[in-house]
Amino acid sequence: MNSKRTDSYLAKYSASSASSRGRKYKEKEHPYRTNYQRDRDRIIHSAAFRRLEYKTQVFINHEGDYYRTRLTHTLEVAQIARTIGRALDLNEPLIEAIALAHDLGHTPFGHAGEAILNELLKDDGGFNHNIQGLRIVDFLEKRYPEFPGLNLSFEAREGIAKHSTRYDTRDSLKNFPEFDNNEQPTLEAQVVDIADEIAYDNHDIDDGLTSGLITFKDLSMIKIWTETKRRMKYRLKLNPEVFKHTMIRNLINAQVTDLIENTLKDIRKHRINSIDKLRKRKERTAKFSKEMRNLRAPLRKFLYEKLYRNRRVLRMTDKSKRFIKKLFENYYHNPWQIPSDFQNKENKNFPLKRVIADYIAGMTDRFALDEYQKLFDPYKKV
């Protein structure tokens, strides 16, 4: 059987395709693709995945075509996570599936969009992009005649639902009893979560420097930056652009190496020899050393204060919230303006506010801006 052959290299604590908890709707196994390979492929071909190309990471798409979008960030997360997974003998197709799906539920305009939708739905269950991602793969994507959604494996869906970083919360799983909050997700899912943070922090340095919102002089106050620069030695005379990329590459390498070494050390220390033992732990197994956590903390604080709280970014954040709030209120009072795809009989099981949130969350930045103009600019053709 194919899954046995492809899983033969895996560590005992990894998620084997052959021992998957399965899918909501039973399907015949594919002759030459494992469960997790099929998950990955379904995500890549989904409409929600394609829309990530025009969704904000930090900088709005129209500010320049250099800056990361949700799509480029997602690909970077997948690349880093696969590297870590291979070193730990984990299931790479599952890692890739979770990584490629981890941001599917994001709204236009980044976390600003999520924050305002959560506020608008505060009495109706709130809005959480992890749970929205699960709604997309379970229900909103319509590609197969046999079932709604993408019918992903339990392990891929769990990785989406339990995605946990400093930017993500797991406070909405009460509506999904199949995912035990007291049970750790697979090590593949844990690796994706940390790869997300590594990609987020280090590539935001790149975008921040390019935008001019942060400078090399600013970064010279951060210990992890200065220590990395010291180790580079002869490369210090590189031109600024090459220097920037070389520094970021070295920063990522140092963090990935630390994570791999510390995770393997933890696995040996606690004698984790099965996925069940890994799941039952009170804390996650994939984590940085204490030294690396202490080095990363000032960098994260710096990025928050200098980049994410920058006046230019905050102005766009505030403007984005106003756009989405006006769109939401308009659709609530004029539901006939919502496309027919969102008014079908299946959606009648959900409150109108949830249907509106589904529609808005699926928009790209430019579609939301265009829709706003069509609704509120009297000179814009509808």
Image (spheres, rainbow, N blue to C red):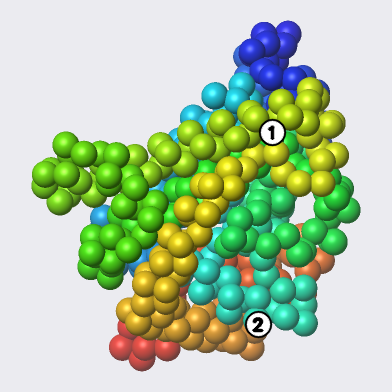
At which x and y percent is residue 325? 55, 84
What secondary structure is found at the residue carrying circle 1? helix
Q: Quadrant of the C terminus?
A: bottom left
- Left or right: residue 286 compared with residue 201: right
Query: In this rendering, does residue 256 appear at all?
Result: yes
Query: In this rendering, does residue 189 appear at all?
Result: no
Residue found at x 65% / y 76%: 118
Q: Residue under circle 1?
A: 266
Residue sitting farthest toward the right: 177
At which x and y percent is residue 181? 83, 52
Badge number at residue 229: none
**Vertical relation: 49 (above or below) 18:** below
Which of these two is toward me, 253 or 117?
253
Which of these two is toward me, 7 or 235?
235
- How packed is label 2: few (under 14 Cα within 10 Å), some, or many (20 or more)? some
- Left or right: residue 263 compared with residue 123: left
**Vertical relation: 123 (above or below) 136:** below
Which of these two is toward me, 72 or 32?
72
At which x and y percent is residue 260? 56, 32
Mark closer to the chain start, 1 or 2: 2
For badge 1, the amino acid type reads: Asp
CB within 8 Å, label 1 to label 2: no
Badge number at residue 120: 2
- Left or right: residue 139 compared with residue 62: right
